Image (cartoon, rainbow, N blue to C red):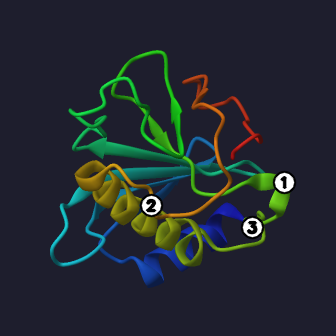
Amino acid sequence: MSLGQQKAQMMRVWPLLDSRVEGGQLVVTGTVKPTPITRSYRVRVTLNDFGTPRVYVLSPILERRVQEPDVPIPHTYEYATPGKEQPCLYHPKSAEWLPSMPLALSIMPWLLSWLLDYEYWHATGEWIGGGVPHGSTKVRDDSPSRAVDDRA
């Protein structure tokens, strides 16, 4: 799908989010709430032509559990700066997400599911979201132009 098609689909399915193509990438920003009883999260999703979607939780900042401060947040990438973990929503080698898929119908629902799993983990210490086990969280470059295709 082209960035314009991705934007059009996003605007149809997620009309309350700000979707725009700027500087050769789709940028989607706004507030989502996984369920009526969960927190609201300000998020940003970006996609370059033929790139890998990047998902950011802008606020509230994702936090480790107070009870286990040395245990990383499951299924995230860590940046060099604490508090900048980025959700890991899929494993690219499994072809769960392809550039032909609309972000609105794949990445966005996966993000809401991940946020719900995060809240449950934060409260209980148990990650119920499934996924490919991480040996450890991976450190990811914060450069938006860097293509990363080793999601797990």
118 or 101: nearer the viewer = 118
Amino acid marked by disc 3: Glu
How far is the residue under mark 1 from the one under mark 3?
Answer: 8 Å
Q: x and y percent of residue 90 in the render?
A: 65, 57
Q: x and y percent of residue 6 in the render?
A: 61, 69
Q: Secondary structure at mark 2?
A: helix
For this orientation, the residue located farthest to the bottom is 12
Q: Is residue 105 left or right of residue 118?
A: right
State the residue at coordinates (36%, 54%). 118
Residue that mark 1 sits on: 93
Residue that mark 3 sits on: 96
Q: Is residue 125 left or right of residue 88?
A: left
- Is 30 rendered above or below residue 101? above
Q: x and y percent of residue 136 in the render?
A: 60, 31
State the residue at coordinates (48%, 40%). 86
Q: Secondary structure at mark 3?
A: loop
Tell me, yes or no, whether the two marked residues, 2 and 3, touch with CB atoms within 8 Å.
no
User: Which quadrant would the N terminus be assigned to in this image?
Assistant: bottom right
Q: Label 3 neighbourhood size at 10 Å, few (<14), some (14-19), many (20+)?
A: few
Amino acid marked by disc 1: Lys
Amino acid marked by disc 2: Trp
Residue that mark 2 sits on: 114
State the residue at coordinates (40%, 67%). 112
- Is 145 rendered above or below residue 75? above
